[in-house]
Image (tube, rainbow, N blue to C red):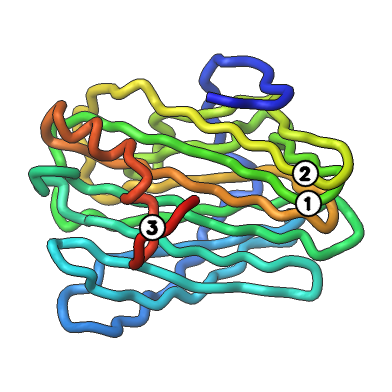
Amino acid sequence: MTSHRLAGRARAVFMSSAAITSAVIALPTHAGIVPGFEITLDLDDAGPVAIAASSTDIGGGLWNFAGNWSSATSEVSFDINVSDDPGRPDTGAFLGSNFTIQNQSLETQTYRLLVTLDLAGPAAQGNYAGSAGFGLTGTDGLLSTLPGSPLWEAFVDGASVDALFPAPTSLSFAGDGSASTSDDLSPGPLALAANDIAIAVQFSLSPGDTMIVTGAFGVIPTPTGLLVLCGPALAGGRRRRRD
């Protein structure tokens, strides 16, 4: 793991008072049963905004969801692969986190993204695993956690399971440049996942800069699947790419 001004390793549990609850309807583009998928954005604590997502069946029980949202001050895009089947032998049910966030304003802004995937059925006596990476580019860049909250957090059935990069964590550089950090969850047992899994990311971002978030979280039926889930291919993208 590489990091800049990375402080603290204790895991944190959060649920912001600006909880994001709005839903987005995924638009089916191919035959098949489209998994329930929701993504919302809260910009500067102004309230949640639903981001429309297009869905593509990419085969093998996997789906891709992609979309874009923009305003006068920000742009958010995502390209996420998912599986809603907890019994899938190689990966179980998983939810990628592959976002690009651009602060196009002259001021620091705060971002809260919540992505939720409905499960096709309950997962009992499984394991969970996950990973997250943050890459900052621009000029005089600064990414910071929000007070009392981690950069990245995983949820099962609405309850926090684990988190990465607890507050206070920051990435920064002077002049034109970039900074990045990444980490994996320590895999752990999960008694039951009945309804859904979710990933939340939240942070403040300096003006004119871009943040790329990658990673995945999932509920996996076998220990061998834990290694598979931490690979970058599951985060998102319908084509091979470099992050």
Q: CA distance from mark 3 to mark 2?
A: 25 Å
Residue under the image location 79 percent in, 40 percent down: 142
Looking at the rendered structure, which numbered label has been put on residue 236? 3
According to the picture, the residue beneath numbered tag 2 turns out to be: 177
Q: Quadrant of residue 155?
A: top left
Q: CA distance from mark 3 to mark 1?
A: 23 Å
- Residue 233's x, y, as percent? 33, 50
- Residue 91's x, y, as percent? 19, 44
In this rendering, the answer to whether 76 lies above or below 205 is below
User: CB atoms at circles 3 and 2 under 8 Å apart?
Assistant: no
The amino acid pointed to by label 1 is: Gly
Q: CA distance from mark 1 to mark 2?
A: 6 Å
Circle 3 Cα neighbour tier, 10 Å, few/some/many (<14 / 14–19 / ≥20): many
Residue under the image location 23 percent in, 23 percent down: 189
According to the picture, the residue beneath numbered tag 1 turns out to be: 138
Mark 2 lies on a secondary structure that is: strand
233 vs 86, nearest the viewer: 233
The amino acid pointed to by label 3 is: Gly
